[in-house]
Image (tube, rainbow, N blue to C red):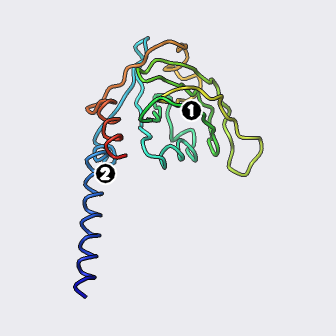
Amino acid sequence: KELNMITISHNTLKLIKNLLITMALFGNLAWGKEHFSMKNPHGTTLTVDLAITQKEHAQGLSGLRPDQFKSGQGMLFINSSMGPRRFWMPDTYFNLDIIFLDNELRIVAIDRNVPAHPGMKEPPTIYKTETYSAQFVLEIKAASSFGVKLKTGDKLIFTGSTSLSEIISKIHQKQ
């Protein structure tokens, strides 16, 4: 029985350690205390939610209705390094502009007015973007004031009390 208590205690300590690491990494994000935004070269600002984990990447904006995602909102998908990125939009109920960004937040490609998809089992075929080399991907509502004048080569600015480099550093530490 002592062996079981040690195992349980060891597993409990392991769980607590992992929980503390997760809280240190994403605590502010998970509790909604930290706000992030992006600014385009034309001075327009966008509030962004971050998609950091694989689960958040897979979920994306799927299932959100148009009234749940405003024109002044975006979702920034964060990857730890540059790499091939391709997006698709199952179960997304409004058209999007999908903006592929390099490690300096410079736009490498934009897929505009990507068509909504009414549900996982519904026709038409789910749209898939081309594959681009990018580190970050920003999804915004199609034709929003933030994205309408953007072009390849433009650089965006990220703001928040935690910088992108700090977030990426923490992702690297976790891996």
Tell me where residue 42 sits by quadrant. top left
Label 2 secondary element: helix
Q: Nearer the viewer, residue 127 or 171?
A: 171
**Looking at the picture, which amino acid does disc 1 mark?**
Arg
- Against 92, residue 70 (above or below) is above
> Of the residues shown, which amino acid type is indicated by label 2?
Thr
Residue 54 at what x, y percent from top left?
Answer: 48, 47
x then y, percent, for residue 35? 32, 35
Q: Residue at x 68, y 41 (%)?
A: 117
Asked whether, in this view, residue 152 is left or right of residue 13, the answer is right
Confirm or deny contact between disc 1 and disc 2 (CB under 8 A).
no
Extreme-front residue of the structure = 3
Q: Which residue is mark 2?
A: 22
Residue nearer the viewer, 21 or 116: 21
Quadrant where the N terminus sits is bottom left
Label 1 vs label 2: CA separation?
Answer: 25 Å
Left-right relation of 132 to 77: right
Q: Quadrant of residue 144?
A: top right
Query: Residue at image x 31%, y 36%?
Result: 169
Q: In screen coordinates, is 49 left or right of 134?
A: left
Query: What x and y, as percent, mark residue 134?
Result: 51, 27
Give how far across and how far down residue 110 sits, in percent: 58, 21
Task: Say how many tags the image has.
Answer: 2
Above/below status of 56 relative to 14:
above
Return the residue at label 1. Answer: 85
Residue 106 versus residue 4 in the image, above or below: above
- Give me the disc on residue 50: none
Q: Residues within 10 Å of mark 2 (few under 14, many from 20)?
A: some
Mark 1 / mark 2, whichever is N-terminal: 2
